[in-house]
Amino acid sequence: MTRRTSRALFAVAALVAAGSGAAVIATVATASSPGASALVPITPCRLFDTRPGDINVGIRATPLAASETFTVPTWGSNGNCSIPTGATALSLNVVAIGPTAGSFLTVFPADVTRPSASSLNWVAGQAPTPNAVTARLGADGRLSFYNLAGTV
């Protein structure tokens, strides 16, 4: 199979540290303080990558279509990640590759109505466009990604 980098969206659960390496960050509710969370660094990983072929990671190998919401589980083993059960939020690097139209991506907890704010914006044909996103997870550990227009 050939490597294809067009019309892809991927989320890498990672936070790049100041010039030297990366660490995945999850916040996890603690048993001793049910309302509180603790910062838990974990190994950098790729939650999903929608590019087909040998680049693909996770449960999807097709780009997001216009007006589509894609929801992924995060807790446990998903993609190349192992996110602790009970994590309440993730810090992600989200990248749009090969967009076919000017659009935006909204990252949000799967159990709430999509907010009207965007997490990443781009124009058609733009070079790969990354953005750091910190997002709360749904109560069941799922995260949603919404694309407004075109494919990405």
Image: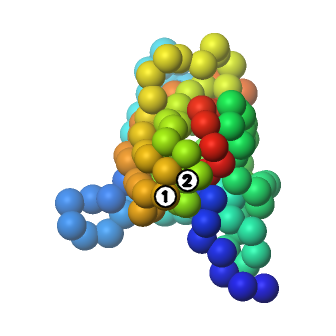
Secondary structure state at the residue bearing disc 2: loop
Residue 27 visible here: no
The answer to whether 129 is drawn above or below residue 57 in the figure is above
* Residue beneath the point at 44% across and 22% down: 117
How far across and how far down the image is residue 22, in percent? 36, 63
Secondary structure state at the residue bearing disc 1: loop
Label placed on residue 17: none
The answer to whether 20 is drawn above or below residue 94 in the figure is below
Q: Amino acid at mark 1?
A: Gly
Answer left or right for 113 relative to 33: right
Other residues around mark 1 within 10 Å, as few (<14) / some (14–19) / many (≥20): some
How far across and how far down the image is residue 123, in percent? 44, 47
Q: Give the residue number, with chain letter if any, for mark 1.
A: 125
Residue 122 occupies which quadrant of the picture? Answer: top left
* Residue beneath the point at 70% across and 53% down: 63
Q: Nearer the viewer, residue 71 or 95?
A: 95
* Residue beneath the point at 68% across and 19% down: 111
* Residue beneath the point at 68% across and 37% down: 66
Q: Give the residue number, with chain letter if any, for mark 2.
A: 99
